[in-house]
Amino acid sequence: MSLKQKAVKGVVWSAIENWGRQVISSGTFFLLARLLDPETFGLVALSSIFLAFLQIFIDQGFSQAIVQRQDIESEHLDTAFWTNLGISLILMILIILSAGSIAELFQEPQLTPIIRCLSLGFLLNALSNVQTAIFQRKLAFNTLAKRTLAAIVIGGIVGVAMAFMGFGVWSLVGQQLTNSLIQVLVLWRISDWRPQLRFSQRHFQELFSFGINVVGISFCTFLSRRSDDFLIGYFLGSTALGYYTIAYRVFSLLTEMLTGIVVKVTLPTFAKLQKEPEKLRNALYQAIQLTSLIAFPGFFGAVALAPEIVRIIFGEQWEASIPVMQVLNLAGILYAYFYFNGSLMMAVGKPSWKLAMDFVQSIINVIGFAIAVRWGIVAVATAFMIRAYLMAPFIVWLIWRLVHIDVRTYLRQGVVPLAGAVAMLGTIFTIKYFLIHSINTYLLLALTIIFSSIVYVLSIFLISPQLFWKVVKMVR
């Protein structure tokens, strides 16, 4: 099977995993949002801030180093596994001992037992990082998809059952831990790799020289993604953070479903093309074009239909999340272009470039969030969106420097999808203008989704028949 066939097959299985995972986990999340209050989600979000920070240091970037390396030896895998496991045990003990102090910082005593229980996830994640990297390296996304879907289904059942039984915040804790445990059990069942009791200093250094940049990148990502949660939780409280968490969860859901299906395949695919620059550039163009076709209508549609989506799925009590959701998804439109940049930089052995880019973005995010938080959660989301658009020209310049793209060709990949998305938006607003007071919200949402989808597909067909049939052929 050629690399192109493997990549396309990987995209298909990545789509099955992402969409299946998101549909199932989102269904569970929507049920829990109906059963639990904003404060409950805010408490778990506060706990996750510190756990996510320590999670950065468990893998040491070794998983991505395993995927990126052209040659891998068994000693690399063994060294990575025991390093991950040892660090996870140390960090789990550390967080158990410091949980009380963290709870006092936010004046939320309920956080102490929640943080201690969730810290078990460190150990579970460490047990599966290397096996996951091995399957990604082989582009065996079908195996990872089956594992993920099984874990989400079982975890979701546990979480919803606990919520119905009145366990409150522990429903979310139980769901997360069950999910992680099932993923480990399934992965060890289907993987034929087992660690041997050995550690190589040389192989550690080879992985660490690449992975240390990944650690830096993950730290910058943490600052960009979690500093808003920290500031909202500290200054505005757990209830406000609950509203923000719901909006960001929808944004993350769309990001994973609309861009994540291709991104997972790009790192191993780009890595195999790192010595063929022309093919690498073409692969980048095709990835952007394919993702734009999916992402543009998804993010634009979420902006236009946010009021109906929130009221139907989450209920009237979550209306404060609507404007936050709209602002975040305006920023998501850029992801169709820029979500691959990290994979590209890592694939060609330039993790330091991504580290520098992420560092600049994270600093701007933190400053923007700190200034905006006094005006509320919508202002924080707006700061995130403004940073995304201000950084866009700089990121294009970085990609040009890295792989010598033709900027016009690069930007042209999204023109047709953008035109189709604009036509789709016109359809949505027209339907809402004439029918919003005539029919119920459920029927209005259904009609807008159906007719706007038809208009989008027809627009693509009429504007660029060649692109339309290219996608049809790819699906076949």
Image (tube, rainbow, N blue to C red):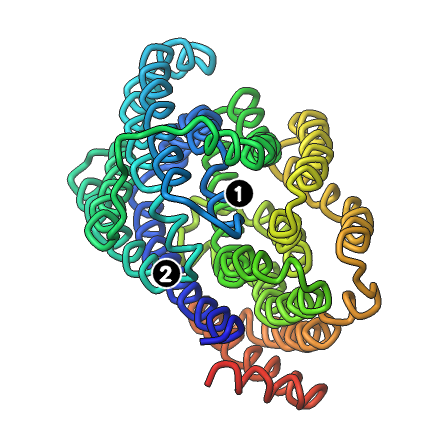
Q: Amino acid at mark 1?
A: Ala
Query: For this rendering, which residue is in front, 26 or 97?
Result: 97
Task: Report the residue marked by disc 2.
Answer: 23
- Residue 79: where, in percent of width, then height? 38, 33
| Residue found 64% across the figure and 88% down from its top | 461
Q: Residues within 10 Å of mark 2 (few under 14, many from 20)?
A: some
- Would you say residue 239 is visible in this rendering? no
Q: Mark on residue 320?
A: 1
Q: Which of the two discs, 1 and 2, sits closer to the camera?
A: 2
Q: Residues within 10 Å of mark 1 (few under 14, many from 20)?
A: some
Amino acid type, label 2: Val
- Label 2 secondary element: helix
- The reply to whether residue 156 is visible in this rendering is yes
Q: Reply above or below: 142 against 384.
A: below
Closest to the observer, 59 or 243? 59
**Whole-percent x and y of residue 345?**
66, 48
